[in-house]
Each structure stands twice: as C-alpha cells, then as structure tokens.
Amino acid sequence: MYIIVVGGGRVGYYLTRALLNEGHEVLVVEQNPAICEAVNDELGSICYRGDGCEVASLEEIGTARADMLIAVTGDDEDNLVSCQVAKHKFNVPRTIARIRNPKNESLFKKLGIDVTISSTNIILEHIEEEVPTHPITHLFEIRDKGLEIVEVKIPPGSTTIGKTVKEISLPQGSVLSLIIRKARKPIVPTGSTVIEAEDQIIALIDPESEEALRTTLRGE
C-alpha cells in the first residue's frame, strides 16, 4: 500500500517506521525542516517538506494514487483538513486522523473521516477494562451502520437479576448477543434466559441508546 503520513513528529516517526517494516510504501509530509531532516536521516529519503493541508503539496507527492492518508500532527484542525482534502480532492479511499481533544471525535465522523484515534479515549477504554465496577465498556464500532458493540456488567443488587430477557424492556434497536459468566461457557441469550449477578452482557446498540441500555440492564 502507498500510505501518506502527515506529521513527522514522535507519533508520525514511529508509525512510519512500523509501516515501513511491514513492507508498505510510506511518505511523510512535514513542515518543520529540522524534523523532516531527522526523519530522512533515520528512515531514508521519505520525508517531503510541505504542508499536508495544502492541495499543491498533496498533489506533488502523488496523493491521488495513495491507498491511505494518516494525519497525526498535534493539531486537530490540521488533521481534519488534511483528511478532507485527501478524501474529497484526491479520492483517497481511507483516511485516519489523530485527535487530541475527544470532543472533536463526533465532528470528525460527521465530516467523513473514516477512522479517528483519540489517545485519551484509548486510555479510558483500558481503564474501563480494568475497573470491574465500570458500568459499560465500548468494544467495537460499526461505523457504516451507526452501531456499537458494548459490554454491560450486572452488579449485585441489580433489579434485573432473576428476570428473563423477555421481561426486560430493552431500548429499541438493542440486541443482547452474548452473556459471559464466570467459570461457565458463554451463552447466546434467548427470551427465557435469566439474568444473573456478575453477568457480562455483550450487546449491539444504537449509540444514542447507550445510557438507556445501561440504566435498564443495571436496574438503575
């Protein structure tokens, strides 16, 4: 694959090195001459000094033939613009943007960025996995369908314990896909499946129903 990385700082450098090791053709776009020189010294002549937000720069490096553009500068706005220019001007099939402010994630998605990476959210997801009392964990997002796969833990004392799935009024569009129980095999729930304390329920939901699902399953 031909991959363009916008931003040659620490994130861009290590990402580029990993992509090169996997055998991809990679070109870095970086405005800072010192950073560009350092990347070229370390990784070979693969860094182009230019502005990844400008059409002229992206045209000169052959963005039209790129399979992917990854914008990892320290500026959310620059990352957004780079991805949008690549997507709409050069028809790059896949764009990925680094986000420093998690509040920008929904905006990036609405504006057509294929994948957003927020280091803050990644850290939070790992915290969620390590904290048993955390009510809901995001496992996977099906972006083109507007759906999420989440895990909800049932705490002791929940009002849903002892009830069957069909007795619980789930939010519209929510589907309980799997129940994981300690020391037992995971089960695919049916209407007659009884909810137990400490159940880990994997569900497919509309993101807007997340709060309602959490409240319903945990009996809050």
Image (spheres, grey):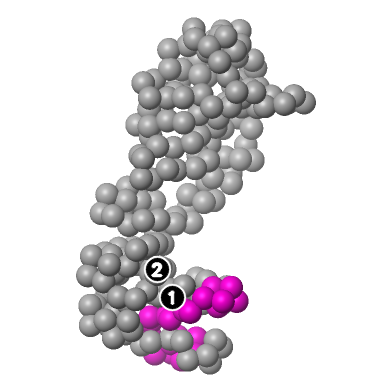
Q: Nearer the viewer, residue 64 or 95?
A: 64
> Residue 2, percent across and down?
43, 75
Q: Amino acid at mark 2?
A: Met
The residue labelled by disc 2 is 68
Q: Are marks 2 and 1 in contact (CB under 8 Å)?
A: yes
Q: Tell me: 142 left or right of 58.
A: right
Q: Tell me: 79 left or right of 162.
A: left
Q: Is residue 10 visible?
A: no
Residue 122 to residue 218: above or below: below
> Residue 4, percent across and down?
40, 75
Badge 2 marks a residue whose secondary structure is strand
- Mark 2 packing: few (<14 Cα in 10 Å), some, or many (20+)? many
Q: Earlier in the sequence, mark 2 or mark 1?
A: 1
Q: Amino acid at mark 1?
A: Tyr
Residue at point 44% right, 55% down? 118
Q: Tell me: 170 left or right of 13.
A: left
Q: Which mark is residue 2?
A: 1
> Residue 49, percent across and down?
36, 87
Residue at point 23% right, 82% down? 56
Q: How many marks?
A: 2
Badge 1 marks a residue whose secondary structure is strand
> What span is colored magenta in the figure?
19-40
Residue at point 50% right, 19% down? 217
- The CA span between labels 2 and 1 is 7 Å
Q: Which mark is residue 107?
A: none
> Residue 5, percent across and down?
42, 74
